[in-house]
Image (cartoon, rainbow, N blue to C red):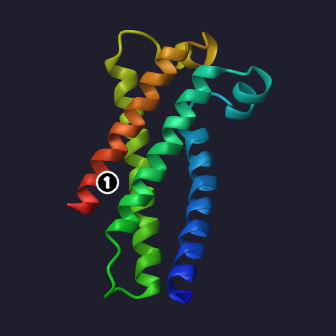
């Protein structure tokens, strides 16, 4: 009637995903030169909100790629290690993409997002995160 393995797998991936999102939020805070808490809560900065939403969406796309490439021949420990490695790799590549975007655009990306509260620039950054995540996802699923 109930597939216990499927239920346990769902609970495990959900718990792991939530942990990844907490860690991902900390990573996002590290790679941006502004305080996310201040920008979102105190200043209600829409540009930062859009950017962070794109980052979290990117993380979920990467997590889906990791889940899709899951191998039944790997042990649970190997799956956990692979998930952590690819999650960290994805986070690093998205941060690298942000650095490249910051150099490539003809304006100060950090100023436009954190100080000018420029929502279209936040959406550009969010789109970059999603694009990088989709590329990584494509590599995972082949």
Q: Nearer the viewer, residue 40 or 29?
A: 40
Q: Residue at x 44, y 75 (%)?
A: 81
Q: Nearer the viewer, residue 102 or 18?
A: 18
Q: Is residue 81 left or right of residue 31?
A: left
From what the image shows, is residue 5 above or below residue 83?
A: below
Q: Looking at this rendering, what residue extends furthest in the right direction?
A: 42
Q: Helix or strand or loop: what does disc 1 sit on?
A: helix
Q: Residue at x 41, y 37 (%)?
A: 129
Q: Position of residue 29 (x, y in %)?
A: 61, 39
From what the image shows, is residue 96 above or below residue 43?
A: below
Instruction: Judge the density around disc 1: few (<14), some (14-19), many (≥20) Cα neighbours within 10 Å.
Output: many
Q: Position of residue 41 (x, y in %)?
A: 77, 29
Which corner quadrant of the image does residue 69 belong to? bottom left
Q: Is residue 11 left or right of residue 91?
A: right
Q: Position of residue 8 (x, y in %)?
A: 57, 82
Q: Residue at x 63, y 21 (%)?
A: 46
State which quarter of the image contains the N terminus. Answer: bottom right
Which corner quadrant of the image does residue 64 belong to? bottom left
State which quarter of the image contains the C terminus. Answer: bottom left
Q: Looking at this rendering, what residue extends furthest in the front direction?
A: 1
Q: Looking at this rendering, what residue extends furthest in the left direction?
A: 142
From what the image shows, is residue 71 above or below residue 87?
A: below
Q: Which residue is mark 1?
A: 137
From what the image shows, is residue 22 above or below residue 47?
A: below
């Amino acid at each position: 009637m109930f597939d216990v393995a499927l239920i346990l797998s769902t609970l495990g991936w959900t718990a792991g995903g939530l942990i990844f999102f907490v860690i991902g939020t900390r990573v996002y805070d590290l790679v941006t030169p502004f305080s996310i808490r201040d920008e979102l809560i105190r200043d209600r900065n829409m540009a930062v909100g859009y950017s962070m939403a794109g980052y979290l969406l990117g993380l979920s796309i990467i997590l889906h790629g990791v889940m899709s490439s899951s191998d039944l021949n790997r042990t649970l420990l190997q799956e956990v290690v692979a998930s952590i490695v690819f999650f960290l790799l994805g986070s690093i590549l998205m941060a690298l993409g942000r650095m490249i975007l910051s150099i490539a655009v003809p304006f100060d990306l950090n100023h436009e997002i954190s100080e000018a509260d420029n929502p279209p620039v936040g959406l550009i950054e969010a789109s970059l995160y999603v694009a990088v995540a989709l590329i990584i996802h494509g590599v995972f699923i082949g």
